[in-house]
Image (spheres, grey):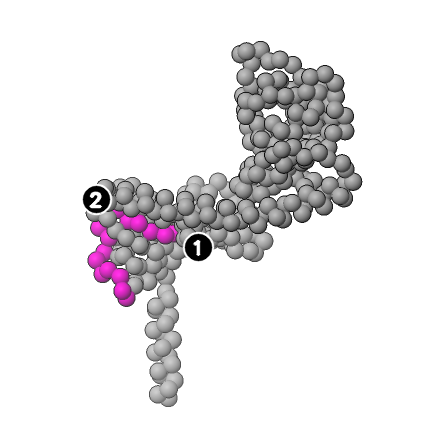
Amino acid sequence: MRIISYLLIAVVFFSSCNKFEKAKSGMKYKITSSSSGSKEKIKLGQIVKFNIEYKVKMANGKDSVLSTTYGKAAGFIKADSARLPKYNFTEVLTQMSVGDKIEFLLDNDTLKKMHMIPDYNEVFVKGGNVTGRVEILKVFTDDKAANADYMAETQAANQREQEKIEKDSKVELVKEKANIEKYVADKKITTVTTPGGVLVEVQNAGEGQKADSGWQASVMYRGYTLDGKVFDANFGEGAKHTDPFAVVLGQHRVIRGWEEGLKYFGKGGKGRIIIPFMLGYGPQGSPPVIPAYSTLVFDIEIKDVTKPAPEAAPAAPGAPHGK
C-alpha cells in the first residue's frame, strides 16, 4: 500500500509539473524556470533578447517549422504592456526571467477568429494548433546596449548563414554538374558553353545582328526547371502572356544566364539555354515558384534584334519571370 501511495504522489507531482496554464486570452502555456538563470522577473520597459520557434502539424500529418531564430539571429522585443500582442508568449513575458523557457499552444480556430491567419489551409488546419517555444537569453535596461547586442547578433548570424550557403553551394554545384550532363545526354542535344558556364543549344542561329551588348532583343521564351516544371512563359504550355519580352543586353536587367545565352542568336534564331543556378536565381531561388539551387532551362525564339531608342530602357520583369 505504501508503494502504491508513493506512486500516486509521483503521478500527481509530475502531472502538475506538466500542466499548461491559461493566459487571459486563452493561450495555453507552460513556463520552465532555469535553475542557473536569474530569479528576477522581466520588467516593463526592459528589452528582451530571446529565441523563438513556431511549428505546426499540417493537413498531411507532417510537422513543419513555420519560423525559427534558433541557429539564426535572436529576436528582440521591448516589454511594453500597451504594444505587446495578445494570444502570444509576450502576454506572459513579465512572468519570466533570464534563462526561462516557455512552451505555448495557439489554437488555429482562435487565430482565425482574431484574423491572425487569413483562412484554413493545408498549413493552418481547422481544429489544429500552432506550437511555440521560447527561451529568454538576455535582458537590457537601455536601448544603447540592446542595439549593440542586436548589431553583433545580426552580424554573427549573417556570417553563419553565408558560410552555410557557401558550403551547401559547393555540394550543389557538384550535383548540378552531373544533373546537367545527364539532361543533355538524355535529350541527345549538342550544346556550346559560354565563358560563364551557360549551355546553349543553337537550333537556328537566325540572321543578321546577334543579340549582343547594347542591342535590344524581342524574345519569346518558355522557362522551366530540369524536371520540366514551367515557371514562366509567353508561348506554349504555361504561357501567362503572349507578347515578346524586350530586353537590352548589357544593362543587367535580366539574370546573367540570359545575358550570356542570347548572344548566340540573331533575328529568327531558336534554341535552348541551360542556366546553372549561380547564373540564375542563385542558392536562394525565387520562392515559391523556383526552388533553391534550381538549374533553369529556356526554350527561346528571337523575334527581332534592334537598336533601342535612347529612352527605351525596359523595366525589369517581376519575379519569377525567369530572366
Instruction: Report the mark closest to the observer, 1 or 2.
Output: 2
Q: Which residue is mark 1?
A: 131
Residue 244 visible? The answer is no
Q: Position of residue 43 (x, y in %)?
A: 22, 50
Q: Is residue 18 above or below residue 44?
A: below
Q: Nearer the viewer, residue 17 or 27?
A: 17
Q: Is residue 36 left or right of residue 88?
A: left
Label 1 and label 2: CA atoms lie apart by: 31 Å
What residue range appears in magenta?
A: 35-53
Say which amino acid is labelled 1: Thr
Q: Which residue is mark 2?
A: 142
Q: Residue at x 67, y 46 (%)?
A: 179
Is 107 in the magenta?
Answer: no
Secondary structure under tag 2 reads loop
Q: Quadrant of residue 246?
A: top right
Q: Residue at x 54, y 22 (%)?
A: 251
Is 51 in the magenta?
Answer: yes
- Main SS type for the magenta part? loop
Q: Residue at x 32, y 45 (%)?
A: 152
Badge 1 local density, few (<14 within 10 Å), some, or many (20+)? some
N-terminal of the pair, mark 1 or mark 2, is: 1
Q: Position of residue 321 (x, y in %)?
A: 60, 30
Q: Residue at x 76, y 25 (%)?
A: 204
